[in-house]
Image (tube, grey):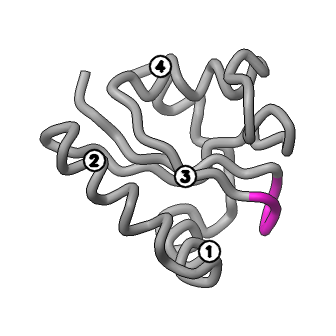
Amino acid sequence: MRPAVYIMASGRNGTLYTGVTSNLPQRVWQHREGIAVGFTQRYGCKMLVWYEMAETMEVAIAREKQIKSGSRAKKLALITGFNPDWQGLYQGIAQG
């Protein structure tokens, strides 16, 4: 499985969480089920709204830091450019 950077949301234009993982389907499932204790559980960030695959974990971590250091407006633009309707993307990654 390739590393990925991802953004979870509590809803359209809601609370956002940016993370990195080596197994995107498993990690998103953990967030959705409330198993991932911490920020996403506390703020209800259960919807995958954006992700980007990376060649290496180092590249993924660097991209995560870049996104986290950006403004909320930049994060919203990133999501809207990739997923204009803010659809939950979990089913698409879980199946394939």
Instruction: Please state the horizontal and vertical placement of residue 82, each as a whole percent of the image.
Output: 48, 65
State how far apart marks 3 and 4 are (Cα).
22 Å
Tell which residue pokes out farthest to the left in this image: 55
Label 3 close to label 4 by CB (< 8 Å): no
The residue under label 3 is 18
Which of labels 3 and 4 is toward the front? 3
Horizontal relation, residue 7 to residue 88: left or right: left
Which of labels 3 and 1 is toward the front? 3
Precedes in sequence: disc 3 or disc 1: 3
Which element carries disc 4, helix, strand or loop? loop
Q: Which mark is residue 95?
A: 4
The residue under label 1 is 76
How many marks are shown on the rendered structure?
4
Which element carries disc 3, helix, strand or loop? strand
Name the kind of residue labelled 3 in the image: Thr
State how far apart marks 2 and 4 are (Cα).
22 Å
Name the kind of residue labelled 4 in the image: Gln
Residue beneath the point at 74% across and 32% down: 38
Binning the other alpha carbons within 10 Å of mark 3 as few (below 14), some (14 to 19) or many (20 upward) gives some
Range of the magenta residues? 11-15
Label the magenta part by its dominant secondary structure.
loop
Instruction: Please state the horizontal and vertical placement of residue 26, each as a whole percent of the image.
Output: 50, 17
Which of labels 1 and 4 is toward the front? 1
Instruction: Please state the horizontal and vertical placement of residue 32, each as a whole percent of the image.
Output: 73, 26
27 versus 14 height, above or below: above
Q: Quadrant of residue 64?
A: bottom left
State how far apart marks 1 and 4 are (Cα).
26 Å
21 versus 94 height, above or below: below
The residue under label 2 is 60
Quadrant of the image containing the C terminus: top left
